[in-house]
Image: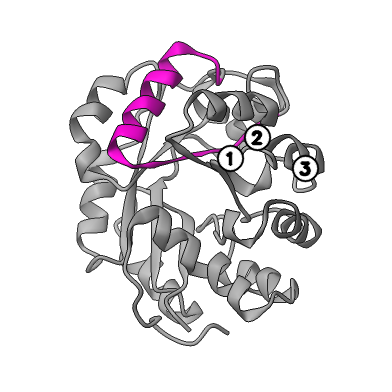
Amino acid sequence: MTGVVDFHARLAPDAGEPARLLAEMDRAGIDRAAVSAGGLIGLDRLAEQIARGGRAAVAAGNDRVRAQCARSGGRLLPFFFADPVTDIETYGRQAAHFRGLEISPAVHGFRLDDPAVSELVGLAAAAGHPVYVVTLARPGTRPDDLARLAQRFPAATFVWGHCGHSALEFDGLAALAWVPNILAETSGCLTVTARAAVSRLGPERVLFGTEYPLQHHSVELAKLAALGLEPADRELVLGGNARRLLGEPDRATAGEVR
C-alpha cells in the first residue's frame, strides 16, 4: 500500500508535540498528516458556539504550527488557520510556507458570504491551497452556503470537514454533490455517512482524516475498513486524493495499517 495520509489532524501548543502525534501515526501506519492549530478555545465553549453562535477572537499560532511541522521530517504538512477579521494580510504574506488554509465559522463566528472569506479563498486559490471548512446549521454557514462559495471560486478546492457537523448530514451531501470542487473529509462522521459520501460524491472526492487528538487514529481507520471499499477506491480515500490535492509524492507507508 502507498502511504496513508491523514487529511485533518491538529497540533496543540504542547511541549510533547509533534513527537506524540508522530508516534501515534507510526503505531497506526499513517505516513503523513495535514495539520492545523488546535486548542484555540476550550471544548465547552466550542460546543456552545457550534450550537448557539458566537465569536472567539483568538489567534491560531500558525508560526508555532509551522515550526512544529518543520521538526517532522516532512511528515506533517502545515495548514494556515485564518480568522477572516485579522489574518488576510498575514496569510497573503506567508501562504508559500503552508500547504493549505483552514477557516472555521464555529471558532471565529463568520458567514461564508463575508467578503473577507472571499479574499482568503482568492489567496488560497492563487497559492494552490485546498480550503478546509466545517459547515454548521446556522444561516450563512450551511452546506448550501459552501456550495455557493465554491461556485464563485471554481479554481479553488474546498474540503468539507467531518462530512458536516452533525455526523449524519445527508442533506449536506445532497447540497454539495453537484459541486465538483468540493471534497468531503470523513473524521467524526458515522460509517453510514462516510459510505454515502463515497457513493454520492465518488471515491475521488473523499478524504480520510482523524481529528487527532480528539479522535483516535484506530477508530477512524476501523471506520474506513468497515466501508468495504474496492482496493483502488480505498487507496484514493486513504491517501491518493490527499496526495493529489497537496502535491505530495507517493512513497511507502510508515507501517502496516492495522
Q: Quick one: SS at disc 3? A: loop
Name the residue nearer the viewer: 114 or 38: 114
Q: Is residue 256 magenta?
A: no
Question: In 3D space, how far apart are the residues under numbered discs 3 and 2 (Cα atoms)?
Answer: 17 Å
Return the mark for residue 170.
none
Q: Residues within 10 Å of mark 2 (few under 14, many from 20)?
A: few
Return the mark for residue 169.
3
Name the residue nearer the viewer: 92 or 104: 92
Q: Quadrant of the C terminus?
A: bottom right
Among the two numbered marks 3 and 1 on one chain, the one whose residue lies closer to the N terminus: 1
Among the two numbered marks 3 and 2 on one chain, the one whose residue lies closer to the N terminus: 2
State the image coordinates of residue 73 (x, y, percent, origin top left): 22, 69
Q: Residue at x 65, y 34 (%)?
A: 47
Specify start and end residues of the magenta stretch as a single range.
112-136
State the image coordinates of residue 123 (x, y, percent, origin top left): 32, 28
Q: What residue is pinned by disc 1?
A: 43
Name the residue nearer the viewer: 149 or 100: 149
* CB under 8 Å between discs 3 and 2: no
Q: What residue is pinned by disc 2?
A: 47
Q: Residue at x 43, y 86 (%)?
A: 255
Q: Residue at x 43, y 20 (%)?
A: 118
Amino acid type, callout 2:
Ala
* Residue at the bottom extreme, as displayed: 256
Q: Nearer the viewer, mark 3 or mark 2?
A: 3
Question: In 3D space, how far apart are the residues under numbered discs 3 and 1 (Cα atoms)?
Answer: 21 Å
* CB under 8 Å between discs 1 and 2: yes
Can you see residue 10?
Answer: yes
Name the residue nearer the viewer: 63 or 176: 176
In the rendered image, the vertical position of residue 46 relative to residue 236, given as above or below: above
Question: In 3D space, how far apart are the residues under numbered discs 1 and 2 (Cα atoms)?
Answer: 6 Å
Q: Quick one: SS at disc 1? A: helix
